[in-house]
Amino acid sequence: MMLEINLLPGAKKGKSATGGLSLGATLASLGSNIRDPWLIGAAASVVVSFAVVGLLFSAQSARATEIEGRMDKAVRDSTRYARVLSARRRLTAERDSVMRQLQIIRTIDDNRYNWAHILDEVSRALPAYTWLTVIEQTTKAPLPPGVDTLPAETQAVGAGAAAKKKAREEAMADTVNVHPPLGFRVVGQTVDIQALTMFMRQLEGSPFIQKVTLSKSEIVIVEGKDVTQFELNAEFEVPPPGVVRTTPLVVPVR
């Protein structure tokens, strides 16, 4: 192996200067060879395109990462809210069931004394020399609260599910009517036509009876005497607050 040592100072410096001069001359010659401006523009546009594509790619990647994070958060929120909504629907169903039971109890409690009030008011308004032969209900008796009142054609096989659901909702709404309409007919006889007028006026003045109308009046023979036979139609009226007094039932517990 042989080692060469340069003992001449300045020789390396001169060589470097020569190399730098040679590189500058090469670039100058390359610049002098490229004189076409369209080629320069094409090269610049390529560089700019690569730069724009890189920026767009970076922006889209950041946007995709952000959207994925938001989507994951939305999925977690949706799962949590689904449980909350399910619990809310269950509680709402329980509340509606309790409210319906309370309405049924209220319907039974509010309507069990209707006929007692009607008979009491009719007896109180009945004048002298007048007697009754018939008192009957003219409206259709409501079914007990909670009974399914779907029509037969809706219950038949082949009826649409939507029609069944709608009819069931309407039936349920009817069965919890707190004060169903109650109409009745009164047939009686009197020997004084003025007594009939008084009877009608006193019935109409009752807080429990309304819409008193005379549907028929005729002269009949009873035990050889002429009497007036009449027929009245009326309806039960819900009295205003304060007319009916209620007393709580207290049962002592031993």
Image: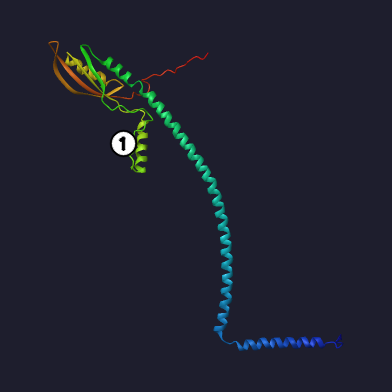
Q: Nearer the viewer, residue 105 or 235?
A: 105
Query: What residue did someone put label 1 on?
Result: 152
Task: Report the number of numbered marks.
Answer: 1
Q: Is residue 25 above or below residue 135?
A: below
Tell me residue 25's x, y (percent): 69, 88
Note whether 150 is above or below 106 in the view shown: below
The residue that appears at 26% across and 21% down in the rendered structure is 136
Which corner quadrant of the image does residue 123 belong to?
top left
In the image, is 27 to the left or to the right of 153?
right
Q: Farthest front residue?
A: 157
Give the image location of residue 193, x and y in percent. Answer: 17, 16
Question: Residue at (47%, 34%) from the top-left corner?
Answer: 94
Nearer the observer, 236 or 167? 167
The x, y position of residue 57, in whole percent, is: 57, 67
Along the viewing direction, whichever of 76 and 146 lies nearer the viewer: 146
Q: Kindly state the secondary structure of the residue where label 1 is placed.
A: helix
**Image quadrant where residue 64 sits:** bottom right
Q: Quadrant of the N terminus?
A: bottom right
Which amino acid lies under the numbered mark 1 shown in the image of this protein? Ala
Identified at 31% across, 36% down, the residue is 152
Give the side of residue 145 with respect to residue 11, left or right: left
Q: Position of residue 223 (x, y in %)?
A: 14, 10
| Residue neighbourhood size for the residue with mark 1, other residues' Cα within 10 Å, grouped as few (<14), some (14–19), many (≥20) | few
The colour scheme of the drawn protein is rainbow
